[in-house]
Amino acid sequence: MIPVMVPWLGQEEAEAAAEAVRSGWVAQGPRVERFERAFAQALGVRHAVAVSSCTAALHLCLVAAGVGEGDEVVVPSLSFIATANAVRYVGAVPVFADVDEESGNLTAGSVEPLLTARTRAVIVVDQGGVPVDLDGVRALCEPRGIAVVEDAACGAGSTYRGGPVGAGARLAAFSFHPRKVLTTGEGGMVTCDDGAVAARLRRLREHGMSVGAAERHASGSAVPESYGEVGFNYRMTDIQAAVGLVQLRKLPAMVARRRELAERYRELLKGLPGARLVGDPAHGTTNYQSCWLLLGRGHPMPRNGVLAHLAARGISARRGIMAAHLEPPYAGSERVPLPHTERLTGHSLTLPLFHSLTAEQQDRVVEALFETAGTVEGSGGGDA
Ligand SMILES: *Cc1c(COP(=O)(O)O)cnc(C)c1O
């Protein structure tokens, strides 16, 4: 079976994790601090705050942006469900905007009609690693006092207008789940340039404590702490950070390899009728965290049939990006029609892409896809 994703982990990560264990300090400590500094430096931002997941990162971003009960937050429905869930965590209402059909991302034009007097924030997503056009959304929102949070869960190693994705945001949230390019098992990061915001994020991830456990340990004396607001336990461990430090060094090679493989898919899939492989937008480059293929109107087999056919050929592919408004917690809540979202979620699939994917395996995937274009027989459940 050809898997859809394999994390690029090796001896170096295993050694780094073992060394953290041997040191006796396994919770958030010196390695988390080093990982944060290295991540901030790689992005060219002032502060990076490590947390337990991107979902936790998004939650903290919304708290830091002052979003609360009754506020509205504009988000794409076409995203992993955590984007919308984070809005519910702070008691706010996710308002779904449609995405651009080409990139799968929000645009200023799709966000604007949904802004109301209650809109407090917008979460833009770099979907599958494709950079969102952040500047346009910021120019729309910030003069109105609306915060823009970048869900860069998929974006490590992607670029936007010549710089790293996330670097241009007031608040950006990253994921290090194994389905993403850079992994620490589980983990996330918030980046920002504002020192006061970063300091608050550090307290919020650690129960609202005024003095962190690692700081207290380092000071050598009994520093009394206080708890100024209700915080969370969203800490990353030093074992995860040790792995993250190795992965961060490998990130350029990981992205280069993914881009090389995606380009090979693009070449080989050229003759597939009506199909389109999502790629670089005009304003940046993708890390191909997801390599998704949109089946055009000319494709004879429904998407789920294509997935079933690939599975029968020993190939594990996945449906494309989900749409939150089609899931029970958000069903029927959309205020405007979301035609591009529904088309993309119903007609796209994510192809296997990982560093050790061989040319022979890639050829098998391509061959199986061409088979689906030649026949409608054997197609499973569709969702046109
Ligand atoms: C993966 C993902 C998340 C959630 O990340 P976790 O680290 O698993 O919490 C959030 N948003 C998007 C767009 C994602 O792809």
Image (cartoon, rainbow, N blue to C red):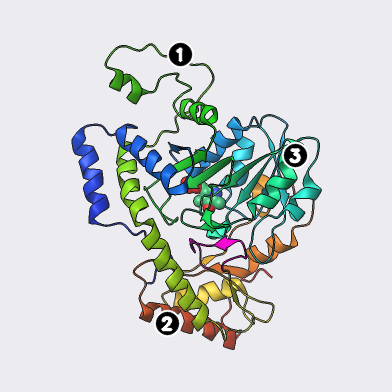
Q: Answer few, some or many: residues within 10 Å of disc 1's Cα (few below 14, many 20 plus, some between 14 and 19).
A: few
The disc placed on residue 363 is 2
In this view, the residue in front, 139 or 244, is: 139
Occupied quadrant, residue 61 = top right
- Left or right for 247, reference 335: left
Q: Residue at x 38, y 11 (%)?
A: 224
In the structure shown, which secondary structural element does the residue marked by tag 1 occupy?
Answer: loop
Q: Where is residue 240 shown, x and y percent of the image? A: 33, 42
Q: Which residue is mark 1?
A: 226
Q: Where is residue 263 shown, x and y percent of the image? A: 48, 75
Disc 2 marks a residue whose amino acid type is Asp
Which range of residues does the magenta coloring cover? 279-291
Mark 3 or mark 2: name the one nearer the start of the chain.
Answer: 3
Q: Which residue is mark 3?
A: 143
Q: Where is residue 110 shown, x and y percent of the image? A: 75, 54
In the structure shown, which secondary structural element does the residue marked by tag 3 occupy?
Answer: helix
